[in-house]
């Protein structure tokens, strides 16, 4: 049986629900209403921390906090603004064993970080303290790194022998 047929059959038996509000219709992760409220971060961004600018600036422009006190990293990017709608799926990934959310988040990460990933050799997930790893049973950053490595040509540090 083809993968699309299996997926379609599962969708009929267990209709997808929105990862934010848990209402039916979340085939892309979010229902239409929640999707329209998600604030994905793109457009003009600080070249260092990735915070969005209200207006387009020159390529490579940094925000005032990064200019005043440069961060210890070169560049960082986020997928979306952390708010009431995005909070629930993020916490579900971190604390509720919702590994089914990883593919969607990995796609969004690849999109948000495409320019950074193009110039990267290795994806290294943020380590998780032993106590947190024990409580959560998995490292969500490692799972996102693994899925992101599949989407890109960048090597996952955990996959290196």
Image: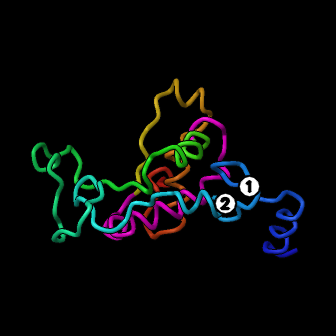
Task: Indicate which disc residue 31 carries.
Answer: 2
The answer to which image quadrant residue 56 occupies is bottom left
Q: Nearer the viewer, residue 51 or 107?
A: 51
Name the residue that disc number 1 marks.
Answer: 17
Residue 125 vs residue 84: left or right?
left
Q: Secondary structure at mark 1?
A: loop
Quadrant where the N terminus is found in the figure: bottom right
Which callout, 2 or 1, points to the residue nearer the camera?
2
Within 10 Å of disc 2 (Cα), the crowding (few <14, some 14-19, many 20+) is many
Q: What is the span of residues highlighted in magenta in the rendered image?
A: 94-122
Q: Give yes or no for residue 91 being in the magenta stretch.
A: no
The answer to which image quadrant residue 11 occupies is bottom right
Image coordinates for residue 108, horizontal then vertical, percent = 50, 62
Residue 140 vs residue 7: left or right?
left
Q: Nearer the viewer, residue 121 or 93?
A: 93
Residue 23 vs residue 49: left or right?
right
Image coordinates for residue 132, horizontal then vertical, percent = 52, 28
Gap between marks 2 and 1 measured at Cα: 7 Å
Q: Give yes or no for residue 114 being in the magenta stretch.
A: yes
Q: Secondary structure at mark 2?
A: loop
- Marks 2 and 1: CB-CB under 8 Å? yes
Task: Please tell me which residue is depicted at 33% across the width and 69% down the height of the picture.
Answer: 115
Q: Is residue 45 above or below residue 130?
A: below
Residue 33 vs residue 17: left or right?
left
| Type of secondary structure dominating the magenta stretch | helix
Number of numbered callouts drawn: 2
Image coordinates for residue 9, horizontal then vertical, percent = 87, 67
Task: Please tell me which residue is depicted at 44% across the width and 52% down the height of the picture.
Answer: 157
Q: Is residue 108 above or below residue 139?
A: below
């Amino acid at each position: 049986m083809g993968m699309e047929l299996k997926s379609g059959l599962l969708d009929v038996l267990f209709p997808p629900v929105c990862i934010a509000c848990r209402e039916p219709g979340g085939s892309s992760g979010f229902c239409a209403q929640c999707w329209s409220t998600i604030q994905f971060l793109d457009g003009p961004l600080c070249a260092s921390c990735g915070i969005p600018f209200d207006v387009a600036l020159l390529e490579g422009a940094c925000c005032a906090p990064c200019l005043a006190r440069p961060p210890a990293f070169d560049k960082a990017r986020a997928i979306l603004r952390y708010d009431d709608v995005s909070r629930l799926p993020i916490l579900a990934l971190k604390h509720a064993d919702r590994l089914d959310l990883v593919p969607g988040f990995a796609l969004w990460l690849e999109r948000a970080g495409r320019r950074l990933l193009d110039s990267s050799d290795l994806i290294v997930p943020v380590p998780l303290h032993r106590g947190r790893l024990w409580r959560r049973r998995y490292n969500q950053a490692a799972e996102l790194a693994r899925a992101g490595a599949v989407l890109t040509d960048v090597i996952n540090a955990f996959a290196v022998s």
